[in-house]
Image (tube, helix red, strand yellow):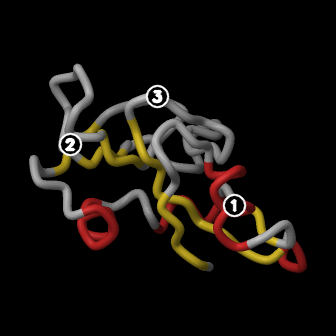
Amino acid sequence: MLRVRGAVGESCDSACKRVLGVHYGCNTEQLEFLNDCGVLAEMFACPEGCGLETGPDLPVYVVEDAPLETRGQCLVTEAGYRNRGALDCKGSFKYTRRACACIPFLFF
């Protein structure tokens, strides 16, 4: 699994292809390994810390200029992959950057 940082507002499906090429895609099950504050801090620095949240765009970094209380934070969810698809490669939000788990299509 390769870790990729999505652009602001970009889904992981799109980020994997943009960064690694058309033969790569996001793997929903592998997102669980990125749903961790320590891992997100390695990827984004998280200047305002890490918090728990819900939403289809997690795990993420909320950009510092976002008009949200969570700006500058990394966000994870307790729900995880096994909870009815809480982690999803298609999710995106206009003020976040996704932490994406990308693998070659050979492994899908």
Judged left or right of residue 45, residue 53 is right
Confirm or deny contact between disc 3 and disc 1 (CB under 8 A): no
Which residue is the extreme one toward the left? Answer: 48
Numbered-mark total: 3
Q: In which quarter of the image is residue 1?
A: bottom right
Q: Does 46 sit above or below residue 69?
A: below
Quarter of the figure that contains the C terminus: bottom right
Picture residue at 24% right of the left edge, 65% below the top: 41
The residue that disc 3 covers is 94
The amino acid marked with disc number 2 is Gly
Q: Does 28 sit above or below residue 42?
A: above
The residue that disc 2 covers is 51
Judged left or right of residue 85, residue 80 is left
Picture residue at 44% right of the left edge, 64% below the top: 34
Work out how far the residue at label 3 is from the one at label 2, CA to CA, in angstroms. Answer: 18 Å
Which residue is the extreme one toward the right? Answer: 106
Q: Which of marks 1 and 2 is in front?
A: 1
Q: Position of residue 24 (x, y in %)?
A: 78, 70
The residue that disc 1 covers is 18
Q: Quadrant of residue 23?
A: bottom right
